[in-house]
Amino acid sequence: MAQDDHPNSSTNERQPLLNHQATDSGEGGDSRDLVSFHDGDGENPRQWSIHKKMVNVFIIALMSILSPLASSMFTPGIEQIADSLATNKETVIGCTTGFVIMLGIGPLFLAPLSETFGRRVGVLLSLHAAADPKCA
């Protein structure tokens, strides 16, 4: 069956993919509701102005470049950092390596916790850790 022949297919971007079908089969399936928007709803990303869309793309791109930047920006000064902390160069490189490894591993643990307990708990715990002098 061709895509155009399918009764649920549409080239209209506003058409939801699942057409509000029930997602729970009664056997422990997914019972979440689909997000729907009304015409003229300012929260609908498909109705945002091009400026608002580009600002969002810029913010996401900026966030994605900050992690590698933070791990590599002090690499030229590793020897000076080691001297000022009275340690050797390998220790400073080890700290940077640990930071980069945790940038990759951290989301593997934090994403499921965020989905289970909500984002508010994760944000509050990270703010507490950042504000607590014993944790920082």
Image (cartoon, rainbow, N blue to C red):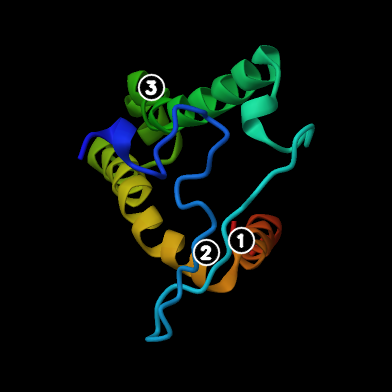
Q: Which mark is nearer the camera, 2 or 3?
A: 2
Work out whether mark 2 precedes mark 1 in sequence or the reverse, and give the earlier one.
2
| Residue at x 45% of width, y 75% of height | 24
* Residue marked by disc 2: 114
Above or below, 21 against 47 in this view is: below
Which residue occupies the foreground of this view, 116 or 81? 116
Secondary element type, mark 3: helix
Please provide percent x and percent y for residue 27.
37, 86
Q: Going from the N terminus, do you reach mark 1 or mark 3 first? A: 3
Q: In the image, is residue 76 above or below residue 64?
A: above
Give the farthest residue toward the left. Answer: 1
The amino acid sitting under disc 2 is: Ser
Tag in front: 1 or 3: 1
Q: Amino acid at mark 1?
A: Arg
| Mark pair 2, 1: CA separation | 5 Å
CA distance separating discs 2 and 3? 36 Å
According to the image, label 1 marks what residue? 119
> Which label belongs to residue 77?
3
**Disc 2 to disc 1: CB gap under 8 Å:** yes
**Does residue 82 appear left or right of residue 13 in this picture?**
left
Residues at circles 2 and 3 in contact by the CB criterion of under 8 Å: no
